[in-house]
Amino acid sequence: MMEEAWERLKKSYVYYKGKPVGTLAAMDPSAETLNYNQVFVRDFVPSGLACLMESPMDSDIVRNFLLKTLHLQGWEKRIDNFTLGEGVMPASFRVLFDTAQGKENLLADFGGSAIGRVAPVDSGFWWIILLRSYTKCTHDYSLAELPIVQKGMKLILNLCLSDGFDTFPTLLCADGCSMIDRRMGIYGYPIEIQALFYFALRCAQQLLKPERDGKEFIERIDKRIRALSFHIREYYWLDHSQLNIIYRYKTEEYSHTAVNKFNVIPESIPDWVFDFIPLRGGYFIGNVSPARMDFRWFLVGNCIAILSSLATPSQATAIMDLIDERWEDLIGEMPLKIAYPALEGHEWRIVTGFDPKNTRWSYHNGGSWPVLLWLLTAACIKTGRPQTAKRAIELVEKRLSKDGWPEYYDGKSGRYIGKQARKYQTWSISGYLIAKMMIENPANISMISFEEDKKIEKPRLSRSSSF
Ligand code: GLC
């Protein structure tokens, strides 16, 4: 299966002026291509990591990808009469051959062509994270030190560090801003973006040079890291004892002494949470904002929180405990649920706007995505639980190649190939490859993980047994 995966990954390479610059999202001859014939920034991350873990290492494609996407960042980005921020990175790009001019051109999408015109807030963060992986792995500091690369990083972070009306250190986002690129009720302060933001800040802290305005930038980053980690660790964390506290919340508290800071009404806690939360284990919930806690579980945000050490060591252990305790719900027959539980009936109609692609237990709405195996595997290794990852890998090996490497599976336990899933989806392939390479050589995870930041204080609250 590894051999087949390598072969398919190499076939997905996209070339620009003779050099590999990325990988296609999918190579499914039987389905309409839409934008799956493009190089997506987020999809390239597992492909890039596979090339960095390969022996001998193939770092050229990663370097070319980082430089080409940086070049695209420099474009003027117009949608109708509106211009996007300078730092915005594309969601995807493709190479077009201009027959009249007889040359290749790059064409980028910053959300202007994407279904629903969704903004790729995660692209810039993934770009910085991959730059750090490349640097850590190759020891080639010259790329990160290039003035254009330093500037690119600052432009990305400038979008997020500027002062405004915010009363929280988290980033306010529209729906569809990340891997879940359709309306799914993740608007607000979604955990996936907050965890990626934190991860990217820690990468930039290492990669930015203190020269000129760099020093001031690093200071702003340090401050934000502290505020962001406090906020997420305190207010997004849910376990049995915290749920009990929320359940007994008083409302309408005024002033800074309020316990129920966001005025969450306990009646808004959905019934399923009471059964889902085990006595041992916990997780970061999906979203926190005034009078709103989205209690849904999102895999990407929680795993990225473990890898970046946004989660404290005890929170990381508790997240893994939850995965063990709720294996049937979160892993089932095919790893891994992107979100849990699914939105159904009236809620699905209101929250997704009747989205026929995101029906219950399909696609982003509780579907199972093989690509997420690499994130789970990395989190398992980091928390010292390789056996859990091996169990998930075994499930993938039973079906993934036989089923043609689909993008996602449907159903409560992930038994069915997704209704509209593409086959030969590149990140399903590269996700499997890096999961295997991390299990074979756990040292590989150092390129995608951080140790705890000792300067940050731990939360004060005492929580359930596993916290
Ligand atoms: C889908 C996914 C998105 C991914 C893209 C390309 O739109 O929702 O996360 O980047 O396909 O694979």
Image: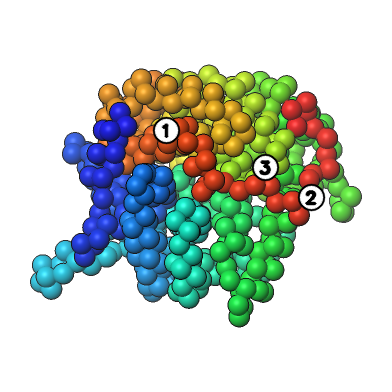
The quarter in which the N terminus is drawn is: top left
* Residue 269, placed above or below residue 77: above
Relative placement, left or right, of 211 versus 181 is right
Q: Is ligand 1 less than 8 Å from the beta carbon at label 1?
A: no
The image quadrant of residue 383 is: top right
Residue 239 seen anywhere in this rendered image of the structure: yes
Q: Is ligand 1 less than 8 Å from the beta carbon at label 3?
A: no
Label 1 or label 3, whichever lies nearer to me, is: 1
Residue 457 numbered tag: 2
Q: Residues within 10 Å of mark 1 (few under 14, many from 20)?
A: many
Q: Earlier in the sequence, mark 2 or mark 1?
A: 1
Helix, strand or loop under label 3 = loop
Q: Residues within 10 Å of mark 3 (few under 14, many from 20)?
A: many
Residue 388 at what x, y percent from top left? Answer: 54, 24
Q: Report the amino acid beneath label 3.
A: Ala
Q: Residue furthest bottom?
A: 212
Residue in the picture at 76% in, 54% down = 455
Residue in the picture at 69% in, 68% down = 219
The image quadrant of residue 54 is: top left
Helix, strand or loop under label 2 = loop
Q: Report the Cα–Cα distance between label 1 and label 3.
A: 24 Å
Residue 311 numbered tag: 3
The image quadrant of residue 235 is: top right
Q: Report the Cα–Cα distance between label 2 and label 1.
A: 35 Å
Name the residue carrying label 1: 436
Do the CB atoms of the residues marked 1 and 3 lie less than 8 Å apart? Answer: no
Q: Report the Cα–Cα distance between label 2 and label 3.
A: 12 Å
Label 2 or label 1, whichever lies nearer to me, is: 1
Residue 198 at what x, y percent from top left? Answer: 61, 53
Residue 157 numbered tag: none
Residue in the picture at 89% in, 50% down = 257
Q: Report the amino acid beneath label 2.
A: Glu
